[in-house]
Image (cartoon, grey):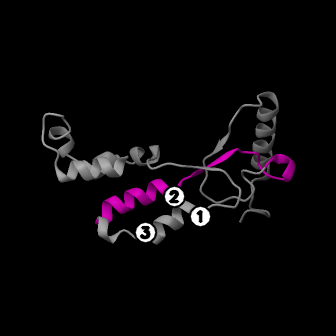
Amino acid sequence: MYFGLNVDTDSLVYLMLANSFLHRKFPNVVTIAEEVSGMPALCRPVEEGGQGFDYRLAMAAPDLWIKLLKHFSDEDWDISNLVFTLENRRYAEKHIAYAESHDQALVGDKTIAFWLMDKEMYDFMSDTSPLTPIIERGIALHK
């Protein structure tokens, strides 16, 4: 899958060249890979045979949060799966984990704040209104 005739070698060489150039020309630059295949060596230096990115986006996390909020009550969250998803990374590979993805907005999904608090945000987010259990939970989890 990652090596052999099915790999777009020209694209990999382009990424290696681009990252090599950027890091030499602009030593403080940070490059971030957005990819979901798990391509090995994506965040290893070009000198080591990698593609030279500094970070990989941990793209499974946003989908997991939405899945948990949409389909499970708090008591039914599979904490071991949550921990596995958040820690499922290659050794020494830097990554950026995030809770919300622009991809979810593109397909018309709600934001995490709306999954947590929905319509109560319109009436119960003021200092002058009572704090409801839904708003209290939503704010606590959104932090």
Tell me, yes or no, whether the two marked residues, 2 and 3, touch with CB atoms within 8 Å: no
In the picture, measured across the screen, residue 53 lies left or right of residue 61, that is right
Amino acid at dot 1: Asn
Q: Answer yes or no: do the residues labelled 1 and 2 have beta carbons within 8 Å?
A: yes
Within the magenta stretch, is there residue 66? yes
Q: Which residues are magenta?
A: 45-73
Q: Is residue 121 left or right of residue 57?
A: left
Whether residue 129 is situated above or below residue 142 in the rendered picture: above
For the N terminus, the image quarter is bottom right
Spatial CA span between label 2 and label 3? 15 Å
Residue 142 within the magenta-colored segment of the rendering: no
Q: Residue 111 has which mark?
A: none
**Sequence-earlier tag: 2 or 3:** 2
Of circles 2 and 3, the one toward us is 3
Q: Sequence order check: which comes first, mark 1 or mark 2?
A: 2
At label 2, the amino acid type is: Ala
Between marks 1 and 2, how big is the CA–CA gap? 9 Å
Q: Secondary structure at mark 2?
A: helix
Q: Which residue is mark 2?
A: 60
